[in-house]
Amino acid sequence: MAKENAVLDKKEQMNEELTESFDFDELEKKLQSQLEEELADMQFLAEEKEKIGSPDNLGNVIMDVVWEQFLNQVAVTAGEDFIKENRGLHLDLRKEAHIQTTENFAEDKIATHNTEIDYQQRYDDWQSNFVKDENGNVVTHQTRSGKEEATLVKGARKPFDDERKKRGLVGNAEKGTDMDETVSVAEIIRDPSANAHMTQEERIEFDLSEKNLNEMDSSWNRSKGDTPTNEWLDNPNSKGQKPQEIFDNMTDEDVEKLRQKDTEAREEFEKKKKEAEQKSIEAGKKSRKEEAFRIGGKALRAVLMQLLAELVREIIAKLVKWFKSSKKALDTLLDNLKEAIHSFIGKMKQHLINAGNTLFTTVATAIIGPIVGMIKKVWIMLKQGWSSLKNAIAYIKDPANKGKPIGRLLMEVGKIVIAGMTGIGAMLLGEVIEKGLMTIPIFAVEIPLLGSLANILGIFLGAVVAGIIGAIAINIIEKQIEKSMKRENVDAQINKGNEILRTQHQLQVVSEAKLDHTKSTAAQNIHERHSAAANMMAESVENIRKNCATDESVDDTFDDIDRLFDELED
């Protein structure tokens, strides 16, 4: 009896230890979850998690390059159109480009951007009055007072003299007088301020005005010549004589009148030049404002064209999606158009960045010229090449690709590089096609804000041809990758199948162990309940026996009960 109890106690201890060591429910749950995951891996094993450098990606690369080139062309063309409308002049809003100063005029620095006044023509006309040496430099001579002045060509005074004679302003032969220009024609011709800001008519008008003309003795006039009055009166001739010493009929009063006349005439001359100079300033401001408005209008139209093109691009993408869908109804079409508009608005930040780029390119082209377009093309090529190289390096470094064979990695990287190089090839080929089409007159026709027809066709045909070549090359690589993927896939499916079988076996073993453990625990519980019942009954009998100790017949009965308990325990 005691030996059997010891065995039961040992089994009970082992069950308790087993229960404490293993949580069969948790282990079964984990194995079941693992099995489900492995089955899911088996189902999706053939799918690639990410397709880098696929033909679809190639198409996106080509489209991005073409689109960037198209928007670049819009901006460059707008800048070139501005130059054409600006008389071939590049954008220049500096003051000196529009407002002509006397100092700059004298140094042949012409405000060529001024659309109100042709200062270049005025300068050329002014310079035509002077004698030039073989190097084109103005020939000079010294006056009686030692001043250096430009030598006039023969006939330089003719327009002034002809107009004076035409008006009959020639003096009086009977009185022996001539009509003298106080500020001489030679002075007016040599004066850079007068020639920069006053027209020929205005200069002649001042020359023949009452303020400037002075009737004087013919001999005085011939002596004075083109010399300013004060200089003539104050400087002696080669014989050391001043005019008042030469001419007996010249009194102090005459000298004072001549000086007064000279002062009045020169004040009037300065006044006329100042008025004309102010007109030049106003004309320059107006011209400057007009040029700013012209480039602003061109840039604004280019930006609006760019935004419209971006919207059209979104709409076309949604239309393609609609055509591919199985349900082609009006309501789905409207839904797709709404999506396109929402997508356009959602990308407004990027559109504004592109608009800023278009604005910059338009203005830069207007300032520098078409070279900006070439610089932008080179930049796009460099950017595309760098992007391709960066993607290739990122693909190799990706932890998800560490287990792939080196041959597979090289082929995937090759696809990425080809996609990038195809974008560059599209640009170069587009240039070649454009040059070829430009030889045909009809393709040289300019389309406002877009450029020539040859340029537009060059961009798209270059992309198509380069895209086809790139797609063929990538397709060849793709087939090799597919063969490698199929072999890897078959091996992976076999390995995954073995893993599933192992997991199923483990799950079966755990389930059987769990069942044995449950049976053992149930038997132990039954035995424990029987033992407890027997002990309770034995205690009850012992109590009854003590109460009936004097009755021998009762003892015999208790002996029978003890034998019964022993049988129950057995």
Image: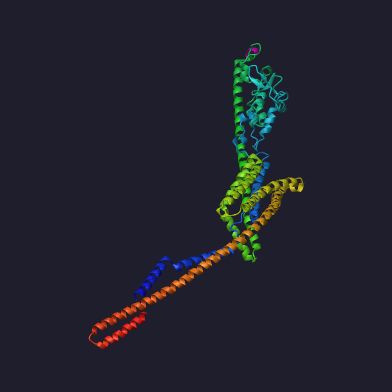
Residue 260 placed where, x, y %? 59, 21
Residue lying at the far top in this picture: please name it.
239
Residue 551, relative to residue 437: is it above or below?
below
Residue 291's place in the image compared with 307, above or below, is above
Please give the name of the residue rendered at 69% of the width and 30% of the height, measured from the top-left corner: 124
Q: Residue furthest bottom?
A: 553
Which one is nearer the viewer's eye here, 45 or 20?
A: 20
Q: Position of residue 474 (x, y in %)?
A: 67, 53
Q: Quadrant of residue 87?
A: top right
Q: Quadrant of the N terminus?
A: bottom left
- Label total for image: 0
Magenta stretch containing residue 247, yes or no?
A: yes
Toward the viewer: 198 or 502?
A: 502
Q: How is the image coloured?
A: rainbow
Give coordinates of residue 564: x percent, y percent: 34, 83
Q: Tell me where the magenta segment starts and ends, as one range.
A: 244-248
Which is nearer the eye, 309 or 542?
542
Q: Main secondary structure of the magenta part?
A: helix
Using the rendered image of the protein, determine whether residue 308 is visible from the camera's viewpoint.
no
Dividing the picture into quarters, in which one does residue 239 lie? top right
Image x and y of residue 315, in percent? 63, 58
Instruction: Tell me the quadrant of the picture where the C terminus can be found.
Output: bottom left
Queried whether the magenta region covers residue 443, the answer comes back as no
Is there any visible trace of residue 538 in the rendered image? yes
Looking at this view, name the residue that lies furthest to the right: 440
**Image: 106 above or below 497:** above
Q: Nearer the viewer, residue 194 or 349?
A: 349
